[in-house]
Image (spheres, rainbow, N blue to C red):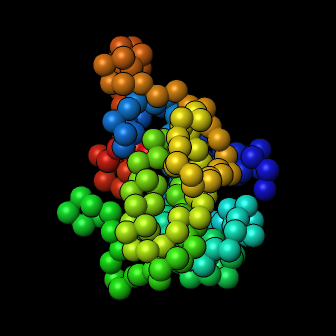
Amino acid sequence: MTEQEVKDLLIETNAIMNGHFLLTSGLHSPHYVEKFNVLQHPAYTQKLCEAMAENFKDAGIETVVGPVTGGILLAHETGKALGTRAIFTERVDGKMTFRRGFSLHEGERVLIVEDIVTTGGSIKEVIEVVKRHGGIPAAVSMLVDRSGGKISFGDVPYKALLRLNVETYKPEACPLCKEGIPMTKRGSTGKKAAR
C-alpha cells in the first residue's frame, strides 16, 4: 500500500479526526487518529498488516510483538502475514512486560509493531522487554508515525505506513485552549487521553 492509500483508508473509516485532543503524551493536538475506527474491520486490518509485514519480509523475523491493546491485533495479523508467531506485552504495576507464559529464546529476531506513535515511548519500553528476554529487536513497524520525524529507536530500523506531521502543543502553550475550544473526549470511557 502507498502512503496515500493508507491515508485514504483512514479517512474513509473516520480514523483521522479533527478537534481538540489530549494525547497520552500529555500534549494537545487538533488532530487524532482513532485506530479502532479502521481496526474494527478485519479485512482492512489484514490489508494494513500485510503492508507492515512486506516492509520486513526479508529481515529474518521469528516473532512479532505488539503492546496491548491495538498492538495485539497488529501483531497477530502481521505475524500471520510473515508466517511467525505473535505475542504481546502488557503493563504490570506500570511496567511493560511479558505475561501469559510468553517468552523469547536467546537471539530470537523480533519485529515490534505499534499503531499510532507520537513520542515512541511505548515502543522503547517494548524494545527493552525484548532485550531483557534475550531477543533481538530487529525492526519496528508502525501504522502511523505522527512524531514529525522526531522519534528514534537507536540502531533499530523502523518504518511507518503513514507519516503525519500533526501539530502538538504543551497544555500551557496550546492555541486551542487559549481560544476556549473544548477538549474532544476520546477513549473507551470518554475520559481517556487520545493517542
Q: Nearer the viewer, residue 133 or 175?
A: 133
Q: Residue at x 34, y 83 (%)?
A: 100
- Looking at the image, residue 34 sits to the left or right of residue 50; the answer is left
Closer to the camera in the image, 31 or 117? 117
**Residue occupying the point 77% across, 44% down:** 4
Task: Determine the residue located farthest toward the left in the rendered image.
Answer: 93
Q: Give 159 or 20, whichever is nearer the viewer.
A: 159
Query: Is residue 53 positioned above or below 16 on the image?
Result: below
Where does the image place residue 171, in percent across and percent down from the top left? 33, 24
- The quarter of the rendered structure image containing the C terminus is top left
Report which quarter residue 172 is drawn in. Answer: top left
Spot the residue most to the bottom.
101
Question: Where's the N terminus, which quadrant?
Answer: bottom right
User: Residue 128, image x and y in percent?
Assistant: 40, 61
Please, is residue 192 above or below residue 183 in the view? Answer: below
Residue 47 visible somewhere in the drawing: no
**Horizontal and vertical percent for residue 86?**
53, 78
Q: Where in the figure is residue 92, as x and y percent of width and height?
A: 24, 67
Rendered residue at 40%/30% (across/down): 28
Residue 112 in sight: yes
Q: Is residue 89 left or right of residue 82?
A: left
